[in-house]
Image (cartoon, rainbow, N blue to C red):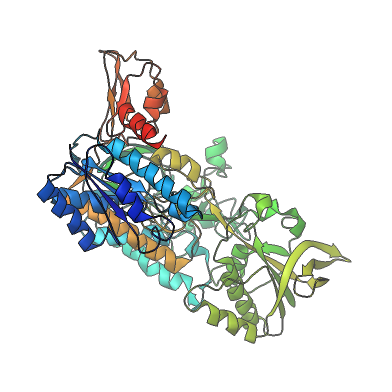
Amino acid sequence: MKIGVYICHCGVNIASNVDVKQVASYAKTLPNVAVSTDYVYMCSEPGQELIKKDIREKALDRVVVASCSPTMHEPTFRTTVQEAGLNPYCFEMANIREQCSWVHEDREKATEKAVGLIKSAVARVSLLEPLEEKEVPVMQTALVIGGGIAGIQASLDIANAGFKVYLVEKEPSIGGRMAQLDKTFPTLDCSSCILTPKMVEVGRNKNIELLTYSEVVDVSGYVGNFKVKVKKKPRYIDVEKCTGCGNCASACRLKGRIPDEFNLGLSKRAVPYILFPQAVPLKYTIDPNHCLYIQKGKCGDRLLCKEACTADAINFDQKEEFLEIEIGTIVVATGIDPFNAALKPEYGYGKYPEVITGLEFERLSSASGPTGGEILVNGKKPKKIVFISCVGSRDKQVGNEYCSRVCCMYTAKHAHLVKEKIPESEVVVCYTDVRAFGKGFEEFYDRVKNEGVIYRRGNVGEVYKKAGQLVVRGEDTLTGEVHEEEADLVVLAVGLIQRNEGVGLAGLLRIPLGHDKFFLEAHPKLRPVDTAMKGVYLAGCAQGPKDIPDSVAQAKGAASSALVLLESGGVKLEPYSAMIDKDRCGGCRICEMVCSYSALKYDSEEKVMTVNEALCEGCGTCSSACPSGAIKMNHFTKEQTLAQIRGLI
């Protein structure tokens, strides 16, 4: 066996704190090492050529590169050795940058540690065996979960490339949170005006099958070959017959008595409803939670809605339907929910009707909202409005330590809208910090201040009423003084949180959630739309809070990643998988219970476990849990791991 060891300076990232020459010299003394050298940038073209040249001329059959994290360049060097004729799985990487140079100040000790890491890598690489990648076919269909702007954009991009898309949305219409907005910052475009054409395009696209009022309830399979079960909830209205005329809603006995969720309860609707005037599809849905006929079997002496429907579209015999579809790739675009301001009782939300959230303000300001676009409190235009920022964001008390990114700018937008609609009003923004990070944001923030909006830096402690007047009490952190502001209206700039169904969906898709409870990307910089589950991609606020342009950009990135998979027709899987020793397997099924990828199944005939190599991610959990030691991980065998440890100690 001939091993080549190559040590990278990484400019000064490694060489400044590790004696690279000394490490290379020591590596030459290790067993089976035929070549040991150092180079300024091993990942550069000349560095890679150096490895290829030695493999060809010196007949190397194992290679170790000591440089940065394998996450960064392991694929690079595997390709390098493969191009030189060596099996890519006969390569090992030692991380002497992130795990050594960057975390130690003592050059002598860092060098000593680098030597240990390379000894460990050489010991392991000598036991590595050539492996072959598996290739599986890819179904030429995509699933997009969530019909907000991110899901809409991803669906259109994939469909316009010629592939079938199933777009699943839990609400009766697509549109998501963007449909609830009045204007968008910083350009002040009408939200509906720029969203509706996209929605209509989705409804008309022949490659998109729109599954509204539906939910994903089960996902099995693996990249390229997912099997998905979708539950279609009954609308109690035949969408093929419904013309969207609204006669059923007009005739409903409970018209104007049901809280309208789209307007956040600020208005009332009938039992048959559409979410908003531009809904796609523009079909009515009967709310089963409030329908007297569905709940009690009787609605007065006559079914007025059914009598009023000239299209004969109402059908109370509808039941839940389940669709099973085969999917090649999945885009998760489930969006966000606003933080529940009631969890901050000191602000009086839910106690005082004059305290509302930013999203409720959007509906008041919108022309399609409950007041026709007029900002009214108790039927009157407010004279003084106070905005409070960071409600439910950057707050350890409620468990949301992250910045929600959009709150500063949507508050600036709201302040502008107040000045536009009520010019004589006084507007105060109580802010923690102003984060105007995006394109045109700082200019918009300056514009709002120049319109007469007062920005007061500080922390608001409470909102209370004094002699019937709302009072905002807080500390001005610039002057150190306590201040009190009387207000007719208080608007809470609530942050963004993961949707309620996110946790359950994460379990179905077998992808983790981050500490912020949003779906966790595979790598925050290099793979921001990928997940730990191959073939599943993230778009928009499913991955974390972001504004509309960033959501659209990420949706296009997720669609591009999905298209690479769909276009390929097949996908190569790394050959890491569990292997079952049938002679030792007792069939206890413990491994099946701990497997996060559903890769292990019990063979009832042979009474042993089996492994689906396409599903297996080679994580090793099953091997650790197996009481009889019947499971072996290829490329991470017990012998290889022990050799690594011996090299270190």
- Quadrant showing the C terminus: top left
Q: Position of residue 510 (x, y in %)?
A: 40, 39
Question: Where is the N terminus found, in terms of image quarters?
Answer: top left
The one of 85 and 103 positioned closer to us in this rendering: 103
- Is 317 in front, or is 35? 35
Quarter of the rendering containing residue 629: top left
Q: Does residue 85 appear left or right of residue 331 in this picture?
A: left
Whether residue 435 is visible here, answered yes or no, is yes
The answer to which of 51 and 258 lies nearer the viewer is 51
Quadrant of residue 376 in the image? Answer: bottom right
x, y percent for residue 80:
19, 52
Where residue 224 appears, as percent x and y from the top left, is 25, 43
**Of 455 and 193, the residue lying toward us:** 455
Q: Is residue 167 visible?
A: no
Q: Count the marks.
A: 0
Which residue in the rendered view is the most extreme toward the bottom?
Answer: 450
At x 63% / y 58%, what residue is drawn?
Answer: 394
Give left or right: position of 156 versus 468.
Answer: left
Report which quarter residue 361 is drawn in.
Answer: bottom right
Residue shown at 21%/62% (left/top)? Answer: 45
Report whether 290 appears left or right of 544.
right
> Where is residue 303 drawn, in percent x and y?
51, 45
Q: Residue at x 54, y 40 (%)?
A: 293
Q: 158 above or below 508?
A: below
- Answer with left or right where residue 597 lies relative to residue 492: left
